[in-house]
Image: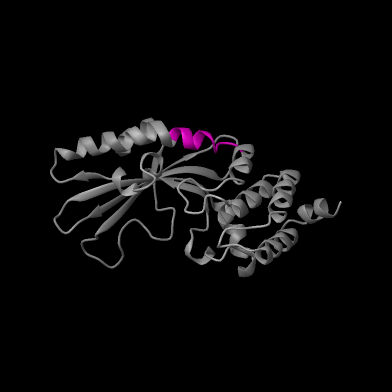
Amino acid sequence: MAEALAVEGFTQCEALDRHGEAQPGKRYPRWRHAWFAADIDGLPGVRQAVMADLMIDRGGCVSVFGWAYVMSDVVGQVRAELPVDALESAAGSLEPSRIDFVSFGDFRYPQNVSRAKSWVAVEADIDNSVVEFMDYVRGEVRDWFGRRSTINDLLTRAREPALGAIDQLNPAPECLRDVVILALSAGCVQEAVSLMDWYRGRDQFHDWDSAERVAAFDAAIGVRFPEYAAARSA
């Protein structure tokens, strides 16, 4: 799989989330995560990432399930500086540098994403599993990344519900905040102001968000980015 992903521009890397590369504290881990990342031209500090989630069942078979991410360490660092009440209510359980994400199953089996798993029971299954995984990477995942390859792409996507989310009426509050932070970090102040004006003007939010949390976020990023506060008051 590493060789196939290298052809697509992805390099194997350390785990990009807080879970690590294998189930902790186990001599024989039940799960392992293999991470692969690629830089995005024109978006410094932002990476596309693919993660293969390997899980062994009680019978000894291994399932292979894929995830795609757009991630930024810069966003994670700014998030860590903001007050808790300025973030979405689930912020403590989310990865700090994750701007957007999707499981492979959300593309073809949104009602039952586990159908996207491939299974390895014997050595002969390995090649087929890699072929299935790469079929997603070269198809739906490539298209998904392509629609998130510029600041303008991300600003547009931030106004939409996340693919596969239960709530299809409201934008994902964590993704919206991350895009605002990324835009400000990249100097796109007016674009961040426009997105926040739109979001603040909504009459409903995701269950993880509220008008109070949005107002607190708006105030907090005004402190973190004085140019944002200046543009808001102009």
Residue 134 located within the stretch drawn in magenta: no
Q: Is residue 59 left or right of residue 93?
A: left
In the rendered image, which quarter contains the N terminus? top left
Residue 146 located within the stretch drawn in magenta: yes
- Image location of residue 143, percent across then percent down: 47, 33
Between 36 and 30, the one lying in front of the other is 30
Instruction: Name the residue rendered at 58%, 45% in the picture.
Output: 160
Residue span colored magenta? 142-150
Q: Is residue 198 left or right of residue 106?
A: right
User: Is residue 89 placed above or below 111 in the rendered structure?
Assistant: below
- Image location of residue 38, percent across then percent down: 46, 39
Between 175 and 200, the one lying in front of the other is 200
Instruction: Name the residue rendered at 25%, 66% in the picture.
Output: 26
Between 171 and 2, the one lying in front of the other is 171
- Image location of residue 204, percent across then percent down: 64, 58
- Image location of residue 130, percent across then percent down: 27, 37
Instruction: Name the residue rendered at 49%, 60% in the picture.
Output: 94
User: Is residue 10 placed above or below 91 in the rendered structure?
Assistant: above
Image quadrant of residue 141?
A: top left
Q: Is residue 105 left or right of residue 172?
A: left
Residue 9 visible in this rendered orientation of the protein: no
Residue 191 visible in this rendered orientation of the protein: yes
- Name the residue at the right extreme: 234
Instruction: Name the residue rendered at 71%, 48% in the picture.
Output: 192
Image quadrant of residue 120?
A: top left
User: Is residue 203 placed above or below 4 in the rendered structure?
Assistant: below
